[in-house]
């Protein structure tokens, strides 16, 4: 079938596949370095407890068949190795069928992690990586030109990401319609970056322009992805620029980067395509069958997207093949942070020597400037933002976090930037307090060197110690 492939997109496919492999690598590295404290046998939300309660068919995962921390580590590091091999172009050195299977390995491994990841993995970029990774496996390698239907289905994912996010903003917080959301967002977003303070202090008229441009990029531009070239390329390029702006303004895991990867499917790079033979019949049949399945599964995400009761970031099948997306339907006006502290005193008092735990990404010490971590994802720091919004968001895991801090648990402390206690001297008590944070002004920054100003609000968790631990005599 002459129409089946698009030889002019061979370079776009090459860049897309290598960029996707890099995102996979970051995702597996994040899992390998953080899972013990979050999901391990002694983690805050242990995988064995989850698999004992949830059946395989609801959450397919290798860890239903067997779990140990060593096995999880082996899977995560294997994912890193396969992703690195794909980044280096290993799929191009294999026959077409083997290249497809190699691309399905990181998808299957990461699906196994996401499906047992519980609250730590309950975000849209997890499903987005899985949906993109599964479809991109059928892009082929150097033996065939890129299939047109796969390129268009990748654009279909991008359309749903952007258009869904645009709709949920218009239907959600009134500040999006009033063009005022960015008066607050840079200050109240889950994990600010090193430039977020400066973005917040941009002139308010420019914030209005940012919001208006966001509406255009998410509601009008996505339609152009399905138009002829060079219009589709111009639309993709505009989306890439917008995503890079978001990369500079905060830490959003790999959400922005996987969106850029998807935009590459519409970006036509004018180069001479190398000669390749026609696609084999089995490959054409396989791709068309996969495409038909994904089109069929698109019904529920589309129904959700057009519904007045649209929900964000929902998977409608356990394999995360077709999902619905969206972000920041509402924007907080005030930033709250949970500050966790410990003391060595036998009797906790207000004037005890309370020492603050320093997290890697979430705001704590007002003088500590935020850093850039994305696309690497700090899962505990991100969930601490939700904990500050409401204790209900942290009910499953916050008590376990406090318990691990009281034990000076090595794996938990590795998630932090700094513990105020030596490894052999755990705190006697741990408490949590809620503070209101706001960015300092230019004058305050010059005078104090602090980027944040914080005000005590209330007690979040009273002083707590391990049950059965006697006081020192």
Image: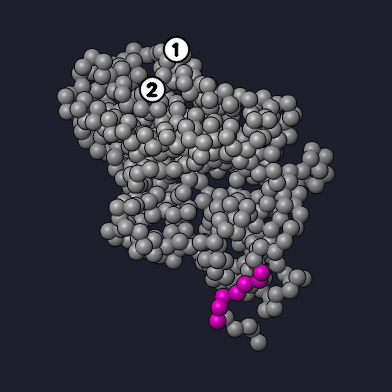
Location of the N terminus (image quadrant): top left
Location of the C terminus (image quadrant): bottom right
The residue at which mark 1 appears reads as 230
The residue at which mark 2 appears reads as 12
Is residue 154 at least partly visible in the picture? yes
Magenta stretch bounds: 462-468
Locate residue 68: give its quadrant. bottom left
Please tell me whether mark 2 or mark 1 is closer to you in this view: 1
Position of 357 relative to 106 (above/below):
below
Q: Is residue 243 magenta?
A: no
The residue positioned 43% from the left and 59% from the top of the image is: 39
Say which of 111 and 345 sits in front. 111
User: x and y percent of residue 437 in the render?
Assistant: 72, 49
The residue positioned 36% from the left and 21% from the top of the image is: 11
User: x and y percent of residue 230 in the render?
Assistant: 44, 12
The residue positioned 62% from the left and 35% from the top of the image is: 249
């Amino acid at each position: 079938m002459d129409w089946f492939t698009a030889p002019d997109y061979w370079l776009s496919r090459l860049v897309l596949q290598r960029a996707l492999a890099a995102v996979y690598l970051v995702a597996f590295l994040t899992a390998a370095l953080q899972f013990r404290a979050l999901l391990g046998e002694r983690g805050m939300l242990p995988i064995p407890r989850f698999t004992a309660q949830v059946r395989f068919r609801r959450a397919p995962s290798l860890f239903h068949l067997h779990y140990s921390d060593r096995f999880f580590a082996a899977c995560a590091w294997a994912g890193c190795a396969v992703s690195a091999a794909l980044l280096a172009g290993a799929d191009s050195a294999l026959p077409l069928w083997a290249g497809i299977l190699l691309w399905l390995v990181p998808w299957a491994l990461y699906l196994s992690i996401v499906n047992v990841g519980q609250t730590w993995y309950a975000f849209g970029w997890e499903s987005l990586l899985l949906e993109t990774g599964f479809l991109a496996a059928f892009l082929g390698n150097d033996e065939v030109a890129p299939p047109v239907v796969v390129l268009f289905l990748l654009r279909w994912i991008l359309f749903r990401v952007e258009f869904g996010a645009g709709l949920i903003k218009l239907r959600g917080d009134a500040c999006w319609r009033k063009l005022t959301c960015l008066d607050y967002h840079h200050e109240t977003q889950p994990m600010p970056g090193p430039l977020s303070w400066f973005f917040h202090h941009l002139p308010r008229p420019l914030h209005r322009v940012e919001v208006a441009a966001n509406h255009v990029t998410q509601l009008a531009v996505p339609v152009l992805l399905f138009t002829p070239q060079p219009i589709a390329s111009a639309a993709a390029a505009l989306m890439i620029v917008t995503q890079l702006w978001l990369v500079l303004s905060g830490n959003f895991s790999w959400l922005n980067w996987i969106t850029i990867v998807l935009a590459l499917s519409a970006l036509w790079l004018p180069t001479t395509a190398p000669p390749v033979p026609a696609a084999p019949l089995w490959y054409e049949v396989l791709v068309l069958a996969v495409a038909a399945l994904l089109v069929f599964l698109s019904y529920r995400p589309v129904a959700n997207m057009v519904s007045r009761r649209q929900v964000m970031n929902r998977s409608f099948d356990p394999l995360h093949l077709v999902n619905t997306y969206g972000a920041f339907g509402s924007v907080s006006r005030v930033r709250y942070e949970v500050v966790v502290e410990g003391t060595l005193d036998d009797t906790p008092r207000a004037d005890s020597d309370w020492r603050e735990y320093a997290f890697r990404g979430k705001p704590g010490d007002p003088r500590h400037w935020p850093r850039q971590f994305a696309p690497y994802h700090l899962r505990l720091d991100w969930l601490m933002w939700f904990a500050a919004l409401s204790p209900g968001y942290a009910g499953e895991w916050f008590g376990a976090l406090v318990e691990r801090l009281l034990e000076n648990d090595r794996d938990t402390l590795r998630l932090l930037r700094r513990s105020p206690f030596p490894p052999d001297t755990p705190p006697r008590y741990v408490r949590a307090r809620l503070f209101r944070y706001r960015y300092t002004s230019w004058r305050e920054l010059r005078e104090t060197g602090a980027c944040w100003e914080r005000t005590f609000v209330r007690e979040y968790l009273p002083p707590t110690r391990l049950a059965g631990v006697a006081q020192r005599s």
